[in-house]
Image: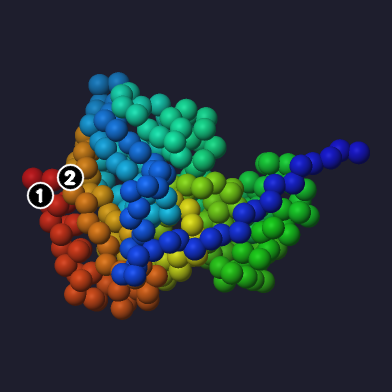
Amino acid sequence: MRTTSEAPVAEPQPIKRTLDGGARDAASDPAAIRIRGLEHSFGDLEVIASMDLCLRPGEVRGIVGPSGCGKSTLLELVSGLRGPSAGEIEVNGSSHPRRRLASCAYMPQRDLLLPWLSAIDNAAIALRNRGASRRKARRAAHPLFERFGLAGFEGTRPAELSGGMRQRIAFLRTLLAGKPVLLLDEPFASLDAITRAEMQEWLAEALAGESRSVILVSHDVEEALYLSDRVTVLSPRPARAVGEVAAPAPRSRPRLEAVTDPAFTAARERALGALTEATR
């Protein structure tokens, strides 16, 4: 009889935050992600130039910049899917590409759900790949369907789901991979404006219950500020970090309340100002 090794799913722990809602700033904590002097080119095309970035454990960092500036390439480099042309990248203290890849769960722009699998089997595919039986993988995924508002849709195929529900399942799949670092590449870019706003609020609540470190790439400054603890602004290609804005707290409050707050408006204007200045 064939045996399988079951991979347990770690219970999410809350992010440790300061009283004003920001991620804890403790100099004694090791960096979850540290980038020094990062450069990358595709042949003669320089995409990233001399970038430095440090992400604290449990921090959600937004990355915004002009279209085509190298935001998605940055995630591929961090995850170890690509090797940098120059510079250093460390994830949880390791610069080795395989170890970085083992620490990162990457959610691309498209949900990439497998059409022949049910919603719960799509969400649990990472557990199956690690040797869990279908029954054990479904058992691990099932509580998250209720937690993320998907109860009753476990057996539904992707073609029968709305775009927002497909993105929720893609996020569940990312969580169930069990990695300490989440890399989210414009997860709501393909959604309409109303669904996108609803999903932003949903993701803010979901991330508030996670202790993982997150890089969220977005072309929407408002989205990045609402979902992140801090936002880094990139220049046009070749990308450089040209600004950094702390997001107003608390991060998980209702979206309409957050984006109409004067402190949020001021932070958005600072980020947009840095972005505008970089493109001149």
In the image, residue 55 above or below residue 82: below
**How many residues crowd around disc 1 within 10 Å: few (fewer than 14), some, or many (20 or more)?**
few
Which amino acid is tagged 1? Glu
Disc 2 designates what residue?
242
Q: Residue furthest front?
A: 28
Residue sitting nearer the eye, 115 or 172: 172
In the image, residue 247 above or below residue 185: below
Which color mode does the image show?
A: rainbow
Question: Where's residue 47, x and y in %?
Answer: 26, 32
**Disc 1 to disc 2, how far (Cα)?**
9 Å
> In terms of image quadrants, where is residue 147?
bottom right
Question: Where's residue 146, x and y in %?
Answer: 62, 70
> In terms of image quadrants, where is residue 241?
top left
Can residue 182 be seen in this snapshot?
Answer: yes
Question: Where's residue 194, x and y in %?
Answer: 38, 71
SS at badge 1: helix
Residue sitting at x 19%, y 57%: 271
Residue sitting nearer the eye, 260 or 244: 244
Disc 1 designates what residue?
277
Residue sitting at x 30%, y 50%: 63
Question: Where's residue 65, x and y in %?
Answer: 24, 48
Q: Are marks 1 and 2 in contact (CB under 8 Å)?
A: yes
Q: Residue furthest right?
A: 1
Which amino acid is tagged 2? Val
Which is nearer the N-term, disc 1 or disc 2? 2
SS at badge 2: strand
**How many residues crowd around disc 2 within 10 Å: few (fewer than 14), some, or many (20 or more)?**
some
